[in-house]
Image (cartoon, rainbow, N blue to C red):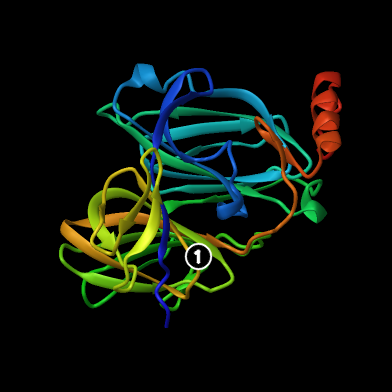
């Protein structure tokens, strides 16, 4: 087995989206080649209702999949095709926008006013850009959780880990999306197929992701390149982009560590991206926005 070295360390940056939702963006709206097939990861975590209640009113998507994972609070959603529902704590929605959806997502806090969730965007290959839209709404109780002998817990949203398979299926990039909790002081290795791009997003505790024992030049966003080894500890709202290998190894800190581990097979296709629509060419992008303005955006009902 070969441990994946750390390629980049990124601290999620504050940004405002929708009608005024304050969140942190780990990556997106730049060169996302290293993350292919993924485009964007947002951490919407807030305990001030005035910073999230305006939500994400009606807006279009085409050419991508959006994956919403709720930890605290709720998100009420609806779309122009008549779908509607509420995502609660622990729930996941995997929405394949395909040829086009116009929808809204409106967050509500828990009884203490806290809201926490993630949204990940995955690109669709050119052959599926105009596929029929599809929802997979998964309740928390239907997401398997596996526990190792050392107390490590993994919620398997998509993909297979330790004999458990997540409920989300039929996804173009065949991704793995898991929520990992490693107890204080424990060391854990997790397999990741070599052909995949992979990243971890830490949102609780801290830990060290191993680079075997060899110092490497690792780019830290906002800082530049520096010699660093496995001794560099990463903590809350930190994203670790891995280089090639077939396993990820983490040593949990004194408070343990909790992180998302996401991997997917790169599409290696051109990306034409503006706002909520991602196509392969600028002409396809222009056409999508022209159709939205003309009221002909929706292709399936």
Is residue 246 shown above or below 46? below
What residue lies at 82% left-to-right and 40% top-to-bottom? 300
| Residue tagged 1 | 166
What residue lies at 79% left-to-right and 52% top-to-bottom? 126
* Foreground pick, 90 / 287: 287
Residue 123 x, y percent position in the rendering:
66, 49
- Report whether residue 117 is seen: yes
- Report whether residue 82 is seen: no
Q: Residue 97 occupies which quadrant of the picture? A: top right
Asked if residue 165 lies left or right of residue 170, the reply is: left
* Foreground pick, 204 / 11: 11
Residue 86 x, y percent position in the rendering:
50, 37
User: Which residue, as the protein is rendered here, is positioned at the far bottom?
Assistant: 1
Is residue 174 shown above or below 275? below
Q: Which quadrant, please, contains the C terminus?
A: top right
Is residue 158 shown above or below 238? below
Asked if residue 4 lies left or right of residue 132, the reply is: left
* Foreground pick, 3 / 226: 226
Q: Residue 213 occupies which quadrant of the picture? A: bottom left
Residue 110 x, y percent position in the rendering:
31, 32
What residue lies at 44% left-to-right and 26% top-to-bottom? 15
Q: Which quadrant, please, contains the N terminus?
A: bottom left
Q: Tag 1, which secondary structure?
A: loop
Residue 109 x, y percent position in the rendering:
35, 29
């Amino acid at each position: 087995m070969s441990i994946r070295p750390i390629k980049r360390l990124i601290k999620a940056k504050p940004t405002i989206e929708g009608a005024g939702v304050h969140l942190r963006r780990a990556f997106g709206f730049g060169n996302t080649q290293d993350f292919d097939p993924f485009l964007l990861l947002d951490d919407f975590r807030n305990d001030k209702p005035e910073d999230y209640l305006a939500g994400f009113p009606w807006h279009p998507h085409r050419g991508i999949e959006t994956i919403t994972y709720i930890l605290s609070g709720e998100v009420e959603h609806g779309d122009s095709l008549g779908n509607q529902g509420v995502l609660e704590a622990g729930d996941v929605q995997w929405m394949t926008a395909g040829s086009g959806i116009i929808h809204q997502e409106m967050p509500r806090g828990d009884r203490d006013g806290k809201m926490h969730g993630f949204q990940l965007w995955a690109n669709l290959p050119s052959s599926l850009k105009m596929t029929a839209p599809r929802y997979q709404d998964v309740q928390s109780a239907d997401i398997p959780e596996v526990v190792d002998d050392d107390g490590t817990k993994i919620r398997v949203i998509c993909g297979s880990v330790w004999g458990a398979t997540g409920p989300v299926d039929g996804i173009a990039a065949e991704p793995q999306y898991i929520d990992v909790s490693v107890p204080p002081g424990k060391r854990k290795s997790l397999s990741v197929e070599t052909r995949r791009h992979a990243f971890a997003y830490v949102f609780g505790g801290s830990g060290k992701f191993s680079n075997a024992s060899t110092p490497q030049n690792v780019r830290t966003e906002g800082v530049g390149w520096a010699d660093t080894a496995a001794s560099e500890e990463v903590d809350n709202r930190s994203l670790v982009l891995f280089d090639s290998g077939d396993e990820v190894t983490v040593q949990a800190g004194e408070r343990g560590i909790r992180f998302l581990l996401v991997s997917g097979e790169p599409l290696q296709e051109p990306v034409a991206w503006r706002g909520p629509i991602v196509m392969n060419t600028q002409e396809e992008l222009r056409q999508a926005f022209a159709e939205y303005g003309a009221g002909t955006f929706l292709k399936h009902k």
